[in-house]
Every structure is written in C-alpha cells, then in structure tokens.
Amino acid sequence: MTHRERIFSLLKGETPDQVPWFGDLDYWANSLIKRGLKPKDFILSDDYIKWHRDLGVGFYLQGYFPYRQFTDHCEVREWNEGAKRFKEIVTPVGSVRECWEYIPTSFSEAPVEHFMKTEEDIPVLKFIYQNTRFEPDYHIAELRRNQVGDQGVVLCYLPKSPFMHLMALEAGVMAVTMAALTTPDEFKDLLDTMKTAFDKAAQIAVDSPAEVLMIPENLSSEMVGPELFNLYMYDYQKEWTGKIKAAGKYSFIHIDGTLGGLLHDEAAVGFSVLEALTPYPVGDMKFEDLAATAGDSESIIWGGIPGSYFTDCVDEEEFERHVRYLLSIMVTKPRFVLGVADQVPPDGLESRVKRVSELVKEFGKYN
C-alpha cells in the first residue's frame, strides 16, 4: 500500500498493511532554505514531495490557511526594526500594536508584544473583527492536489477557536485570563464577534479542495484546562467537526503540548484525528496510556516521536528504542499513526527520518 492508501484505510476504519508513518517537515525545510541549503521555492515545488518520497515519509502538513484576510475601515501599518516585526491597526475607537521577534538560532519568531494587553483593548479588537472579511485562496490546495499523488493527503487549516486564537497569538495567557475574570461579559462578546468572522473563514476552508481539515489549536493543558476548554472552545470545535464530517471530509486537532489535563475532553469532541501527540519523556504522558485516556473515542492517535529525537541531542540507541516501543503499541490495533510530535527541527538528521521508515517496515506489521 502507498502512504495515501494507508492513511485513508485507517480513516475509513479499515486495517492497512502496516502502521502509517507521516511527518511534518515544514519547519526543517524552512531552516534549510534560510541556510541556503534548499532553493527559495523548495516547499511549493515538486521536489518537496520528492524529498518526502526519498525519506520514506508520508506528506500531510504545510501550514496553509486557504483564505485571505482583509481588515476594512481600519488603517494597518507594518514595519521592521532589525529582527522585530511590528504591526499596528488604527481604528476609530483606538489602536493596538503587536511585535514578533525573529530568533536566528532557532529559525523562528515569537510574539514579544500582543495586540490585546488588557481588557481595555477589547473594544478595539471587537471593531477589528466586526470589519474583518475573508476570501477564498485555493491556489496552494490545488497545487498540492496535483503534486501529492500517492505520497499523502491535502490538508488545509480552519481558524483556531477564537479563545485559542487570542491565547496563542493576539493576547497571551495573562491578558486572556484577566479579561475573562474581570470583564466576562465584554470578553464573551469579543469571542462571539470573532466567531462570526471565523465561521466564514472556516466554511471557506471546508469548501476548499482539501481532503482533510485541521483546527490548529496548538493546544497544551498547561495553558487551557477542562474548565476553560468546555466554557470557551468545545462548542466551536464540535460545530466544525460536524460540518467537516457532513462535507465528507476528515477533521484533525493539533494538540501538541501537555496532554494529561485535556486529552479526554478533546477526544470527546469527535475529531477524526488527534494529531501531534507528544509522549514521555518530552511530554507528560506515556504513550501506552494515551488510548485509555482518550476513552471510548474512535479518534485516531497520531504522533509519538518528539522532534528532538531526530537530532543528535538523542543518541542512536535511545532513538531506536523509542520508535520500536511506539510500534509495539501501534501494531496491536489500527488506531495509530506514527508521526513527528510535532515537527522535525532545524538540526534534524535525514538519516533518522529514513531510519523510521525502515523500522516501520520491519516492526510495523499488525499483530
């Protein structure tokens, strides 16, 4: 069977010939481009899919939202100062500014200043989302559909839930927590306004050429426990997993942080796939406990190999032991996808990715 046949066999509740093996190589590939080791157009080229094929790993992720976002009736200013990237949005009711700083050693950026700093910024953000619109942008999805072939599937993103969007991108833990506690009505009104906008983007994603669809929550139970999840996130996820299923497609949730406090609740939503699960010794749960914690859910458990295991920070013996341990569990039931949890990092080793493919062939046949 091909990588594509294996994953669709599993999604349909069937048993493939061996455990499917898929990996997110986007972060690694971007670092290779920045180092001049791959051409600038590498990720969107046919050679990117060929790279997956040469490494023996299935393709599915590319960090792609299939729509463009526009903010009307506002002035948007963007500029750079060295490694810092600024964006300011000026509205009739005030302005907000964010800053992301690029870290060369990690080939990544992170927010150092959020749009929403206190609950006083809620009216500004509400105005922005009242004047936000989305338009389809299916070019990359159509390109991938022609490129991927038997190497995998075409996946697109819906927006995060409004709560997680604020938590991860536009406000941060402190501002979200304080707003939810001190001005709960105004905070809920902002989330409702955001959802009205996000629902339009989500429908565009569901209507896209994607075969599988992800809500990229980047969720960790250190940030969101069951109470906040059920109060602010469950309904959004439940609604859109239902609409994805009604469209004849499959739903993914990206839950790549600590798992113990939230995995059972997420499994109850009804996602087709719980993706990027990171187990002990990097995460907080042993892999053999994940299925039991997920309960009666039929969701596929996808992940298992922490990104650091693809680097020389982990010795070869431990790498081999961990992959074989994962496979010993995965072959007992066709419910698992062996995956990177969550990305191969910039110092990843091609030999490790190739070795996973060899180990799957040797030890990945079902009992």
Image (cartoon, rainbow, N blue to C red):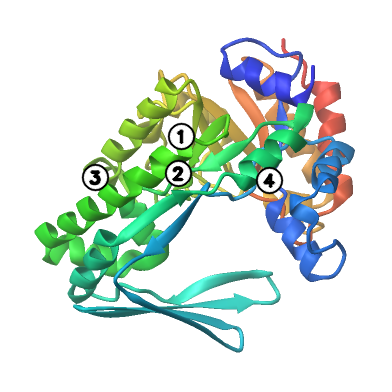
Q: Residues within 10 Å of mark 4 (few under 14, many from 20)?
A: many
Q: Earlier in the sequence, mark 3 or mark 1?
A: 1
Dot 3 corresponds to which residue?
Answer: 227
Q: Amino acid at mark 2?
A: Leu
In the rendered view, would you say 312 is above or below 357?
Answer: below
Residue 223 placement (x, y as % from top left): 37, 56
Which of label 2 and label 4 is nearer to you? 2
Dot 2 falls on a residue whose secondary structure is loop
**Contact, mark 1 vs mark 2 (Cβ under 8 Å):** yes
Which of label 3 and label 4 is nearer to you? 4
Dividing the image into 4 quarters, which one contains the N terminus?
Answer: top right
Dot 1 falls on a residue whose secondary structure is helix
Q: Amino acid at mark 1?
A: Val
The Cα–Cα distance between marks 3 and 2, rounded to whole angstroms, is 23 Å
Dot 2 corresponds to which residue?
Answer: 158
Q: Amino acid at mark 4?
A: Asp
Evaluate whether residue 76 shows in this view: yes
Residue shown at 80% from the left, 27% from the top: 360
Which of label 3 and label 2 is nearer to you? 2
Which of label 3 and label 1 is nearer to you? 1
Dividing the image into 4 quarters, which one contains the C terminus?
Answer: top right
Tell me the number on the disc at residue 24. 4
Residue shown at 33% from the left, 43% from the top: 199
The Cα–Cα distance between marks 3 and 1, rounded to whole angstroms, is 28 Å
* Foreground residue among 90 and 353: 90
Dot 1 corresponds to which residue?
Answer: 206
Q: How many marks?
A: 4
In the rendered view, would you say 176 is above or below 15?
Answer: below
The Cα–Cα distance between marks 3 and 4, rounded to whole angstroms, is 31 Å
Q: Earlier in the sequence, mark 1 or mark 2?
A: 2
